[in-house]
Amino acid sequence: MTVSNEDLVKEINALKATNERILNEARGTKEKYQTLKATTEQEEKDKLTENEDWKTLVGKAEEKVATVTEQLKATKVKALKTELRNEVFKFAKDAFDVADIVNNLDSSMIEVNEEDMTFKGIEEAVTALRTKKSNLFDTGKKGTMVDGRPGMGKPKEKTLSDMTMDQKLDLLRTTMMEQAS
């Protein structure tokens, strides 16, 4: 059975429409939930105020403050991590993976000001890491194969003692032909 392109396009459009409908329903349900939750909390608060149950009101307010504080802390940590990655990238544009650079930085070289979300010592820490672990950076050097194994730089020259008899004979013939011409 073959399916035409038009049939596939129709099917994709139908799936997109279904997806959009489901997303709209989910948004509506979320809004209803948040409205219901806020209404319920307000009713509970009003009931406690009416009954003058200040201890419970204070407890609920403290719970809410603790929750918001935790959310703020998590958001701040996430923002600091993002800002750290951005700062590191400024000095490690040739890094293969910025996350590897961030994970390997010497944290004792970096000062963090959480209030204004700034860092000091990033450039020095990246420079030290570049010296310590150059494999995390693209140095522009291409590896070569030395005796069938990966190595850096030029392969070493073979000496006569390293050559087989056939290689020695080939070298002798090549040398003799060059001298004859």
Image: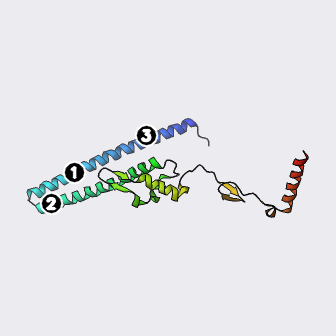
Name which residue type carries label 2.
Val
Screen quadrant of the N terminus: top right
User: In this image, 162 relative to 64: left or right?
Assistant: right
Q: Position of residue 34 (x, y in %)?
A: 26, 49
Closest to the observer, 166 or 159: 159
Depth check, front residue: 75 or 11: 75
Q: Residue at x 42, y 48 (%)?
A: 86
In the drawing, what numbered circle is on residue 58? 2
**Quadrant of the rendered structure where residue 161 is?**
bottom right
Residue 164: where, in percent of width, then height? 83, 62
Q: Which residue is mark 1?
A: 38
Label 1, label 2: how far apart the Cα atoms are: 18 Å
Position of residue 136 measured from the top left corner of the image (x, y, whole percent): 53, 55
Q: Amino acid at mark 3?
A: Ala
C-alpha separation, residue under disc 3 versus residue under disc 1: 32 Å
For the point 51% across and 55% down, the residue is 130
Kind of element beneath mark 3: helix
CA gap between label 2 and label 3 equals 48 Å
Badge 1 element: helix
- Residue 75 is situated, as x and y percent measured from the top left of the image, at 32, 53
Q: Is residue 18 above or below residue 160?
A: above
Of callouts 2 and 3, the N-terminal one: 3
Q: Residue furthest right?
A: 180
- Foreground residue, 64 or 146? 146
